[in-house]
Image (cartoon, coloured by chain):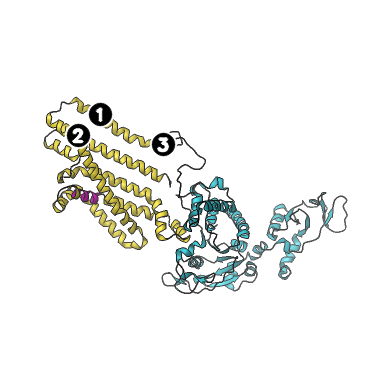
Chain colours: A yellow, B cyan
């Protein structure tokens, strides 16, 4: 438990070489390359256009950066809250004592997931008031289920004989959870968190309608003012952001699952 | 005593396990042998009765603390796939708060004990090991806290027959060094006879039908249930319990050169008195090929060799390869008929 090595004993591979971790995961480079090429094409196209003062104001780099910051904060807050709530609930539901309660909660989670985030974000604004808080709550509701389900599934799929072995050698239930069950469930749990994260990046675009800012502001202004090219560019930035965050999550997922493969 | 859906899996059981002995729990499926084992470390809580370990009732102590003092080895091995072999073995010593150097030295010693080179295996992961190797590690992990008592639930059940036999042999050698009190669940009578100092035969519903030495179980089954369970192979199984050193062997005449023909089998030997060939065999014009079997072997080994090399007798030699006698096929049949002589 002190040191963690991913390579089998006797196999020392230099990074980047065939057999090394980077080489084995070279497929991970495809996604960022596509994103960067796509963004470059959008920028190339936009630089051929003559922008009027309205369009320039929407695409002003300093303003866009501020929107990006709001967007990332909204995504970050909601994802952290989802993890903080859904993981402990998932652990509780995965215990065999939860029994029939588990099915009930997961069904309710499925119901929440079916609500359209756009409607929820606006309804919650009436109740919780406009601003970041209401938007965060809406995002949490929208992305709660994948994390919850994957936590439950990840823990339930741990081989019961491992748990028997752990208990049989004198590990307490709590220690078995921390040392055996959670480490083995982490790859599945991270996959759920990845889904939640990507959902949140996309849904955070609606934050503009409840005064929570974000990159949705740029898209919304461009659409209201009839500037189609600018709306296209702003949408491309949101899409690129979602793809990059998905990529980062994918890389960390690969890192955690490499240990137990 | 424990209840599973109404009828108790083990209704009434009185079993005393002597210190340092291997006790084999055997019986048909659903007879409660595994339940009995799991009650000993309280993975299944008994609903009544007492289980006394070394004078203390196990139900009086904290279950987790109790289990750290009892080695536990299961058929599915249950090595943690995210931990290395060394980390797997070190789990209990670490829980007991041993310091790092002591743990790592002890892990190496245990790996040696189960016949695995620490340098080669310490840092590997369970998935990189064969089934047999995994179970060796499983046994090493069970021994990790140096517990006085080991519970083993069909540890060699899922391993191919050849490897299983080797693991059983090694297990007996290890037990000679460590002398643990071992409770061993099996459904394989051959395994029970081979490994057990005592065999507890369970009937349906956890009733104890017979609890005795392997020899006694095979020769004097307590009732019809045991007789049927032991089955028709009992006489052959007994051969593997009978050490050659306990037999009165035929004398052989040893010769280094000339062949005296006075009605005895004559064994040719070299200068160091090691047998080289049969030189004369009464009643046979052509002496059979020489086959030797160690004195430490069993009658089963001798019979196996006779059948294998189509020879009516084998020469028995001691550790220094000195001839100690011969065992003839027809004498063997006579001996087995008269049980009394062998005991």
Find disc 2 in the rendering and name its residue.
A62
- Disc 1 is attached to a residue of which chain? A
Was residue B7 drawn as part of the magenta stretch in this picture? Answer: no
Find disc 3 in the rendering and name its residue.
A22
- From the viewer's perspective, is A151 left or right of B299? left
How far apart are labels 2 and 1 at the CA level? 21 Å
* Percent of width and height locating residue B239: 67, 62
SS of the residue under disc 2: helix
Was residue A137 drawn as part of the magenta stretch in this picture? Answer: yes
Q: Earlier in the sequence, mark 1 or mark 3?
A: 3
Q: Earlier in the sequence, mark 2 or mark 1?
A: 1
- Disc 2 is attached to a residue of which chain? A
Q: Earlier in the sequence, mark 2 or mark 3?
A: 3
User: What residue range appears in magenta?
Assistant: A134-142
The circle on residue A41 is 1
Labels 2 and 3 in the same subunit: yes
Residue in the picture at 77% in, 52% down: B290
């Amino acid at each position: 438990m002190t040191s963690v090595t991913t390579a089998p004993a006797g196999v020392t591979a230099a990074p980047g070489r065939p057999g090394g971790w980077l080489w084995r995961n070279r497929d991970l480079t495809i996604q960022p390359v596509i994103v960067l090429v796509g963004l470059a094409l959008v920028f190339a196209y936009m630089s051929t256009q003559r922008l009027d003062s309205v369009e320039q104001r929407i695409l002003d780099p300093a303003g866009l950066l501020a929107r990006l910051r709001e967007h990332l904060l909204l995504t970050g807050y909601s994802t952290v809250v989802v993890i903080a709530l859904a993981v402990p609930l998932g652990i509780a539901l995965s215990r065999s004592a939860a029994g029939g309660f588990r099915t009930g909660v997961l069904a309710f989670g499925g119901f929440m997931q079916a609500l359209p985030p756009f409607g929820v974000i606006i309804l919650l604004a009436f109740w919780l008031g406009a601003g970041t808080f209401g938007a965060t709550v809406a995002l949490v509701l929208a992305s709660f289920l994948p994390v919850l389900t994957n936590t439950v599934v990840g823990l339930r799929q741990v081989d019961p004989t491992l748990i028997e072995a752990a208990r049989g050698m004198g590990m307490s239930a709590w220690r078995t959870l921390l040392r055996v069950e959670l480490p083995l469930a982490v790859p599945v749990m991270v996959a759920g968190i990845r889904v939640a994260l990507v959902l949140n990046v996309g849904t955070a675009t609606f934050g503009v309608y409840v005064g929570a800012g974000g990159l949705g502001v740029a898209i919304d202004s461009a659409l209201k003012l009839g500037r189609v090219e600018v709306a296209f560019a702003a949408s491309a930035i949101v899409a690129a952001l979602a793809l990059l965050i998905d990529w980062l999550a994918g890389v960390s997922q690969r890192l955690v699952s490499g240990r137990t493969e | 005593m424990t209840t599973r859906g109404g009828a108790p899996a083990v209704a009434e059981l009185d079993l005393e396990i002597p210190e340092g002995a291997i006790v084999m729990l055997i019986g048909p499926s659903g007879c409660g042998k595994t339940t009995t084992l799991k009650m000993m470390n309280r993975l299944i809580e008994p609903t009544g009765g007492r289980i006394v370990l070394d004078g203390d009732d196990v139900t009086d102590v904290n279950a987790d603390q109790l289990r750290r003092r009892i080695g536990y080895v299961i058929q599915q091995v249950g090595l943690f796939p995210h931990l290395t072999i060394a980390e797997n073995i070190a789990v209990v010593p670490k829980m007991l708060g041993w310091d790092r150097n002591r743990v790592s030295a002890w892990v190496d010693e245990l790996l040696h004990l189960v016949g695995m080179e620490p340098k080669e295996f310490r840092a590997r992961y369970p998935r990189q090991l064969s089934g047999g190797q995994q179970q060796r590690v499983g046994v090493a992990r069970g021994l990790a806290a140096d517990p006085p008592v080991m519970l083993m639930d069909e540890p060699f059940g899922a391993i191919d027959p050849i490897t299983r036999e080797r693991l059983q042999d090694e297990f007996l050698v290890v037990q000679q060094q460590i002398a643990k009190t071992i409770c061993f669940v099996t459904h394989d009578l051959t395994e029970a006879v081979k490994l057990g100092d005592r065999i507890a035969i369970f009937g349906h519903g956890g009733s104890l039908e017979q609890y005795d030495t392997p020899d006694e179980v095979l020769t004097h089954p307590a009732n019809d249930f045991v007789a049927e369970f032991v089955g028709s192979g009992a006489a052959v199984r007994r051969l593997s319990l009978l050490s050659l050193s306990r037999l009165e062997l035929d004398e052989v005449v040893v010769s280094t050169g000339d062949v005296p023909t006075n009605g005895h089998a004559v064994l040719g030997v070299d200068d160091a008195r090691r047998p080289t060939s049969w030189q004369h065999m009464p009643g046979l014009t052509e002496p059979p090929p020489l086959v030797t079997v160690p004195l430490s072997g069993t009658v089963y080994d001798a019979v196996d060799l006779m059948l294998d090399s189509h020879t009516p007798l084998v020469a028995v030699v001691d550790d220094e390869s000195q001839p100690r006698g011969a065992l003839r096929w027809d004498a063997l049949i006579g001996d087995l008929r008269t049980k009394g002589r062998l005991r």
